[in-house]
Image: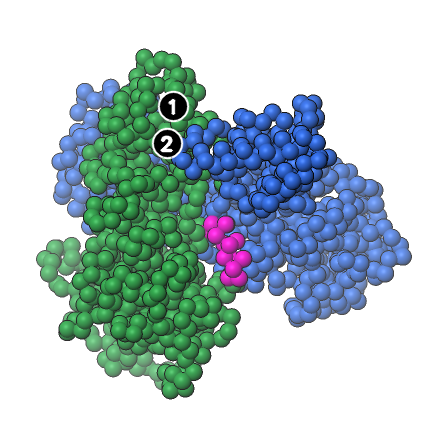
Chain colours: A green, B blue
Amino acid sequence: MGPLFQLSSRRSLCTSSRWRVKQVTTSNFQESLEEIKTHISASDFVAVSMGTTGSPTAPSWLRPLPFDTDQTAYSKARRSAHRFQLLHFAVCPFSVAHPNHLIIAHPYNFVLFPRDELKTGMPAYSFSCQTSLLASMARQGYDFNACVYNGISYMSRAQESVARIRHGTALSSHRGMNTSTVFTVADTVFVERIRSRIKHWRNSCKSSDTNTKTSKHEELINSLKNIVLGSEQFRSRPCMTIDVCSERQVQLILEMLVDYSDDLLPLPVPTQNGTIHSVRIVLANSKEDKDLLERELQNFEEEESKNIRGFREVIDLISASQKPVISHNCLNDCTLIHSKFIAPLPHELDEFVSSFRAVFPKVLDVNYLMKKHGSMKKVTNIPSAISYLNNHFFAPVDLEIPDQATVKEGKIHGLDALRLSYLFMKLCSILKISPNVTESGNKHLTPELEDLTNVFHPFSALIKDSFNEDVGLWTNNTKKVSCEHLVFLWGFKFGMTAGMLKSVLRSAHDTFSGEFDVKLVDRSCAIVVFWQPGLSKEFMEIMNSEETTGGIKNLVSDGLRVTGYETYSTICRLGLWELDLAESLERASESSCRGIESKCERKSCEIHWYNDNVINLDDL
Amino acid sequence: MKPHKLPSPALARVLTRALSSAASTTTTTQCGSAFPSKTVTTANFEPSLAELRRHVRSSYFVAIDLEMTGVTSAPWRESFGFDRSDVRYLKVRDSASKFAVVQFGVCPFRWDPSKHSFVANPYEHSFPIIGTLILVTQMFATEMGVISVDIAVSISLAMRRGYVVNGYNFYVFPRQELAGLGPCDEFLCQSTSMDFLAKYQFDFNVCIREGISYLSREQEREALRNICKFKDVRDIPLVNIADILFTARMKQKFSEWRDGLLHEQNQEDQIQEISKDSKFKVIFFEMHPALRLDGFTRHQLNLIQMVIRKHFEDLSYVSVNSETSGSQQLVVYTDSKDELDLLMKKVKEENHKEAEMKVQVAVGFRHVIDLLSSEQKLIVGHNCFLDLAHVYSKFIGPLPAAPEEFAVSVNKCFPHIIDTKILLNTNSMLQNRMKRSRKSLASAFTSFCPQIAAGSRNNDLVSLSHVKVDIEVGDSRSSSWNPGGKHEAGYDAFMTGCIFAQLCSDLGIDFKLHESSKQLALNEILQKYVNRLYLSWMHGDIIDLNTGNKVADSSPSHSLKKRYPKILFENIVIIWGFPSKLKASEVRECISKVFGPNSVISVFHLDATAVFVQFSKTELVSDFLLVKDTLERGDGAILVLHPLAKLLEGGDTCAANYDTYKEICGSPLSEGLFADQAKAVGIKWKTKLTESMVALGDEEHENPSVQRNVNTAMQNVERTRQNTIDQLRNDPSRGHVSSFDIEDSSSVAEANL
């Protein structure tokens, strides 16, 4: 960054409308990669934010709901991460200067597209798009053509290794295999056969090489012979292909060739599904020529893998820098990053957390920070959070964007990462947390921040808060409920509201004479919480017994069904995702998966009940 | 028809030259203005629809084509040689219900009768000459391709007429215009299809921003049903103090206002009192004094509604939706019950009308489909089974479970459909002409309509036999534009229509005799082709939409039949979940060791996790499943020694007959790998035994059947060894090395035993 840019840099205080973000597409990706590399290594934090092709929203029950446990919330995030793809990824490396609350930020917005570069069904054979989300992005002026035409491709680490094998660039992986195993008789026979084949072939190649001064006639015969015998060439060098039946045979051939000759280069030829069916043996002119060929292939491989990695290069940079990552919705973003850039998501939350932390050791959730500050529990999106803080608190934060001048006007997509860094600074200042990174050999976060890292639950703020200091703020509308007290009801008349359902239930049976709450989860299903212990069990027994009478019998005859919270856990875990929750519950109860699932331990089976969490169908 | 005299060789030579020069222009002219179709988005949908309505009414036939966001949702859902026609339908159903239609091309073709049109050389054939044409064509077809046609047509040069086409290119996007109604909020994109669209410069921005939305017939019915439901306000228990205070205040305000009204108009100040509050506005509604409520929350409005109902007989709460003033909440005073009823009836009707209007707008693009359906025009498509499935699932209702039901339902909506692919492949004459080229739409277009494909600027070189097509955009006509390039639905529909027009002409269908589209559809010559669609192109499975029955491919030489020999589906076992490294040859080997070297006809990889194994005999299917089941139930030690061990390694290998495959295909889920799909569908068993097989298995349970199997396996190993050489000879793909491997592994198996 030259002094010119420093001079022309602008300090915008809270007018996010003037912020500009550098847009990166395939055309300027390589140069931006170099740039961001230096910015990341110089930064204290990296804020990230991403746009996908969809995310479940109300009224779908597939969105994270307040009554989700850690595991069910993770299962839902896993589903979304698997289904949807990324359209843009905003990265904003920034450094902070605490005393005067100054941020120096370098915001980038990478336009992505899940292009199937290698025609191997990766990163995704097919993916889902959410119509309403695309339509609202379109309203905000999102350029889908730029995205599809010029979006940067990407691929996860796991996919890359599969692609390398399939694409025949797994050259190096076959190197250095140790000759540990014992040779069987069959192995020896095999090796000898191959050795003699190669010997004959090599001799014939060499002889035709030396007899270069043959007559035209012979040349013709030779070339005809080549055609007839199907001799092949690889990068203008003669080669032969040996079919193999197992990895073991590949290894045998490779080992044999090491001792055999200096000018033969073996190249395993992979098939579509990654297994190796044959080995191509290339005859080089000399040892130097062989090394040259090898280098050539390695360079080719590197180029290739660079193309394959695409945007993941940036993710790898962030990961390698080990800088703390700032995100807005940690669970969502991290599951996305894991599934798109690392590997497919594991089934269990614990596995995910440990796998993710191995790549990104520290993630800070700004949403969680905001919840830490009690008054902001309802502010969910970043711009409104910023304006809320600006209106309610005096906490000036200076934002400096050194590259601002180089960015063209009108490009305002992917602002969220920049906003996040601003919001983060602001929150730190309000919460009196020092964002400074202590530089004692390794970079460390202040202990306050350290405590706030790696929280992977969208509503987990409440768990801590309601236990610790802020009880007063929450108790009037949040109660801790054991999952045992919750039941799901479905099969009621379509279009019923929670209130209607509640009064129907109250008049139907005595178990509802006590205190209970009903909330609609989606249009097909409701959740009931019994505030008195034991009643949920009693109610389920009554519903399933044969001697039901009166109102309840009537309701059951009309199709009312009930199930416990564990069925809900099961459908999330098994991924029985139907559009309506009722359908999923029905499927889970009718199939035999209950038996399987009962053995899985029920951990963290407590959720938090909001009284203001009514999903009003009239509003939809 | 009698064979006519062949033209002289000299004439043929001249024409050869003419043709070759025409052919050369075909390849050179590839630039210029784009194909002039009308792009329709939300911005110009209404007027375009009206225009289209006119054009469709006067058309002879309408060609359609669709662009989708994808075709197959998972690799194992792609079309295979092992697809039975019902499975093929399920795959199409999956595709049509998951992917979105983003562009819809509609091209009404109208026969131009006007003599004084400025269209150059209108063109017409009369029947006897056409007869000549066909015969000549057949005779010359193999040697000189299309030239012979020119000869015959040159005779009828005097009276040429042509078609006028209006190309419409609709951008469609499944946006939900009415909350909670209409297309599903999610659709699938196939990465390669998106690339394809991008390659042809598809404008995604226009599609998403301005694409026309739609409601299917079923969704429309549901929307209308919802309007009819009168929204009843439930009693809200007044739990919190704020609500109680609010209702009390409202009650007081309304009674003051009402009392003010009742005490004649002299007490103006009373009315003034309430009108000071900005939330109430005194107005007259349908000649009744009324208060308009502004700035209340929904909850508060509900409370007000409750207050009015509970405490005031002569006041009523009215919610009006009108186009001009939007949604209004009113409290209206009426003198009598009759008056109130009358008012309420009127309001209800108006609201209803308004809501209906909204639904009509939301119906959107489906108006085009309704138009095509109600006009009963002949619909022309190219390989259009998937297209029709899309049309049905998007605009009519969910696709039925079986192809037969689908056929019947489609037939009700579109009584006359013709597929140019059927025409090209089942007519021997046309097939001869297509022989050398591939049967894709574009290649059919260039071989049947070279003059249009070339852009028809060199009119003198255009062979005279070809149907003349003019394109009308607005009021102007043109016969010169840039061909192809742009792969858009409108252009594809246009190509399809041109091919059809040309084929009709080649088949000798006289348009002059057919005054309407209906008659064209009932044309004798076309009868063999109308309403027949390829269900499975590989097997030549054709479905007759009139009856829902499958029709055997009547084509004299279905070349594909040779490539895909008849498959006996009852002989097929599907195996999945085996170790992923296992190759087809290894699967064959495993099974052959147990059931004999000739037991397996073919092994086909569905994807990395699943294979089809086709046995030589039907019994072998149940034998195999039984052996597998017994092995898995039995002692692990025996399993290890068994030749099938390799296949069953890992313990997740499942197997079932073909019907299970169908069942799994019918599931709405689409996991990437077949084994995952089977798991997601909820298959818990490892081996699917049919009832008869289970009975058999129980009988044998007393016998040491496993032992028997091992014995047979041993015998088979012996046999395998003897047959190794044979097998190798039969399998040319194996080289020396792999032959060694087979010997090797069989000896290993022997050693193990």
Which secondary structure type mostly characterizes the magenta part of the structure? Answer: helix
Amino acid carrying label 1: it is: Leu
Left or right, residue B430 beside residue A476: right
Residue at the disc numbered 1: A505
- Chain at tag 1: A
For the residue pair A395 and B540, the one nearer the viewer reads as: A395
- Chain at tag 2: A
Instruction: Name the disc covering residue A248, or none.
Output: none
Q: Secondary structure at mark 2?
A: strand
For the residue pair A157 and B637, the one nearer the viewer reads as: A157
Residue B349: percent from the left, percent from the top?
Answer: 68, 32
Span colored in magenta: A129-142
Left or right, residue A120 beside residue B476: left
Residue at screen point 46% across, 26% down: A493
- Observer able to see residue B526: no
Answer whether residue A57 is magenta in the image: no
Residue B169: percent from the left, percent from the top?
Answer: 65, 54
Report the Cα–Cα distance between label 1 and label 2.
Answer: 9 Å
Residue A402: percent from the left, percent from the top?
Answer: 38, 78
Residue at the disc numbered 2: A518
Residue A163: percent from the left, percent from the top?
Answer: 33, 61
Indicate whether A229 appears above or below A540: below
Left or right, residue A530 beside residue B284: left
Answer whether residue A135 is magenta in the image: yes
